[in-house]
Image: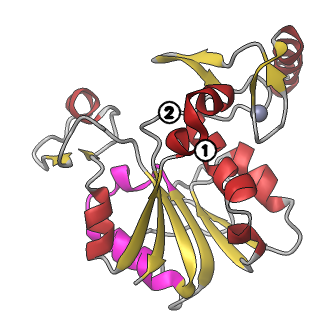
Amino acid sequence: MSRLVDAVRVRAATARHRGGAVQCPLCEHGFDRFKDEWNRPNALCWRCGSHERHRAQWLLLHRHRPELLEDARALLHFSPEWCLRDQLESLSHLRYVTTDLDPAQDVELRLDVTATGLPDDAFDAVICSHVLEHVPDDAAAMRELRRITALDGWCLVMVPLALDRATTYEDPTITAPEDRRREFLQHDHVRLYAPDIADRLRAAGLDVEVVDLTRELGADGAARHGLLASDLIFLCRPA
Ligand SMILES: [Zn+2]
């Protein structure tokens, strides 16, 4: 019942906001604007539910660097979001594998990113977006991402970023959900990353290319696709 109601609501909102001012690269629908999220305007796609970071990832993988997906044979996706999952599952040349530690999620593998148990070089493409800010030992997670990514492969990393901070903020004594929400943006985040996450990834043995799509596309392009400057993409390759 609720799924049916949701589907009807999505269809109605998609029709009501149809337009040409913004465009979602995932579902390729155009709208007058994106839907507001509780803490920011112009955030969500009316149709597929994509957030700014999902649109940035798909723009990179589908339009700006299509070779990343075209050359990949097996992709491991940590905590996959449905809007991206639908697109990636439709790529017939790719063995697409989903994983999440949360037993409530409908995924193929139940893996801990700090100790996956996978063989070395298991995947030539890995997406790990909005996961590391939940992981106490992120250095172990980054080493594990390095280990399971094939030498000629890539690993896409994104985290919530505070662009105004010079260094990542963490304090293991902050454990109460309300304190973590105040300090780290969400009740289950264990730190607030700054762009120096790139140094942590390098320390784990990864070469890191920092992709800023808002700069590549310019202000008009970023606004058209509803992108955020803080959604830097860390495109990593084994060093
Ligand atoms: Zn969409």
Give the side of residue 177 with respect to residue 234, left or right. Answer: left
Question: What kind of secondary structure does the magenta stretch mostly adopt?
Answer: helix
**Residues at marks 1 and 2 touching, judged by CB atoms closer than 8 Å:** yes
Figure check: 68 above or below 78: below
- In the rendered image, the vertical position of residue 97 relative to residue 158, given as above or below: below
- For the C terminus, the image quarter is bottom left
Name the quadrant containing residue 204.
bottom left
Residue pointed to by mark 1: 56
Is the CB of mark 2 within 8 Å of ligand 1? no
Q: Position of residue 13 (x, y in %)?
A: 81, 13
Q: Amino acid at mark 1?
A: Ala
Q: Which residue is nearer to you in this view: 73 or 230?
A: 230
Q: Which mark is residue 195?
A: none
Q: Which residues are magenta?
A: 129-149
Tell me if residue 29 is in the magenta stretch.
no
Q: Position of residue 67 (x, y in %)?
A: 72, 70
In what quadrant of the picture does the N terminus appear? Answer: top right
